[in-house]
Image (tube, rainbow, N blue to C red):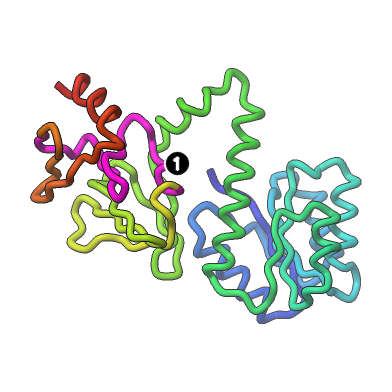
């Protein structure tokens, strides 16, 4: 799923930076950039496919808050969401009053941007399934998920779940060991948070610090699994789930 978005900022450098961040983000599609609110309002009316606006607040002709209120009154509150970008933190309360999805305080980096963008992705993904007739259950959707997005070295990286051999938790970070890669990917996340994003039918938590891709398990004992040349222990806390897995695996 790609989110169609526009960037609106009357500072040329800020507009260029936000536009470049959008273009670097795999699930965002930059429709256009605008240097004033009036031009962006015209585009919003002309292009119903616009879903997300990265919007500066202080602009001369039409402020970001005023533009947000116009959108809210137009009945497109759910189909268009706003992420405010501003150098003035005193507008934060006004931003939340118009139900902004997020609020980026300048200067912000790509990591801050992707955090806000991911929030938008989660929102539109949830909206898509809520509007789809005969939508599958939450558990079915988790099982069908084919990829996840991770922040790696200040970039948002798309990872095919089928390539994940196993995952090791390291306090505030996790290591993902992938098929075909000599070095693991390192991302700032908790193991539990990452576990919630993975397909439930192809991944198994067997240890406080390890999640394994069941398709890559080469051999098992009662207390461990082997993936390629790595042996990973199964701790008592996860024995019940592991025992159920073994029944189906055999």
Q: Is residue 211 above or below residue 98?
A: above
Q: Is residue 41 left or right of residue 118?
A: right
Q: How many marks?
A: 1
* Viewport quadrant of the C terminus: top left
x%, y% of residue 166? 25, 47
Instruction: Where is residue 246? Give x, y as percent.
Output: 19, 25
| Image: 167 above or below 201 | below
Magenta highlight range: 193-220
Q: Is residue 195 magenta?
A: yes
Q: Is residue 128 visible?
A: yes
Q: Is residue 179 above or below residue 58?
A: above
Residue positioned 66% across, 28% down in the render: 131
Q: Name the residue beneath numbered marker 1.
A: 196
**For mark 1, does the 10 Å Cα neighbourhood hold few (<14), some (14 to 19), or many (20 or more) residues?**
few
Q: What percent of the width, then of the height, locates residue 16?
A: 63, 75
Which residue is found at the position 47% from the left and 30% from the top?
141
Give the quarter of the image for residue 59: bottom right
Dot 1 lies on which element? helix
* Residue at the image point whose x is 83% and y is 69% from the top: 91
Task: Give the quarter of the image for residue 98.
Answer: bottom right
Horizontally, residue 21 falls left or right of residue 68, namely left
């Amino acid at each position: 799923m790609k989110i169609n978005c526009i960037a609106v900022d009357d500072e040329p450098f800020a507009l260029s930076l936000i536009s470049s961040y959008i273009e670097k983000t795999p699930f965002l599609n930059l429709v256009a950039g605008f240097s004033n609110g009036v031009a962006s309002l015209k585009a919003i009316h002309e292009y119903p496919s616009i879903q997300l606006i990265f919007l500066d607040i202080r602009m001369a002709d039409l402020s970001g808050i005023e533009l947000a209120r116009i959108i809210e009154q137009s009945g497109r509150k759910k189909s268009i969401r706003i992420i405010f970008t501003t150098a003035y933190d005193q507008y934060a309360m006004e931003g939340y009053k118009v139900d902004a999805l997020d609020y980026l305080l300048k200067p912000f980096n790509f990591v801050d941007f992707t955090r806000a963008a991911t929030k938008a992705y989660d929102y539109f993904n949830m909206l898509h399934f809520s509007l789809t007739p005969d939508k599958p259950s939450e558990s079915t959707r988790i099982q069908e998920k084919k990829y996840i997005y991770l922040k790696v070295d200040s970039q948002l990286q798309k990872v095919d779940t089928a390539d994940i051999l196993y995952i090791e938790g390291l306090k505030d970070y996790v290591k993902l060991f992938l098929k075909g890669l000599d070095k693991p990917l390192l991302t700032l996340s908790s193991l539990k948070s990452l576990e919630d994003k993975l397909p439930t039918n192809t991944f198994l938590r067997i240890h406080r610090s390890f999640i394994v891709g069941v398709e890559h398990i080469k051999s098992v004992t009662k207390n461990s699994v082997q993936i390629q040349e790595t042996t990973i222990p199964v701790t008592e806390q996860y024995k019940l789930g592991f025992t159920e897995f073994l029944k189906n695996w055999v």
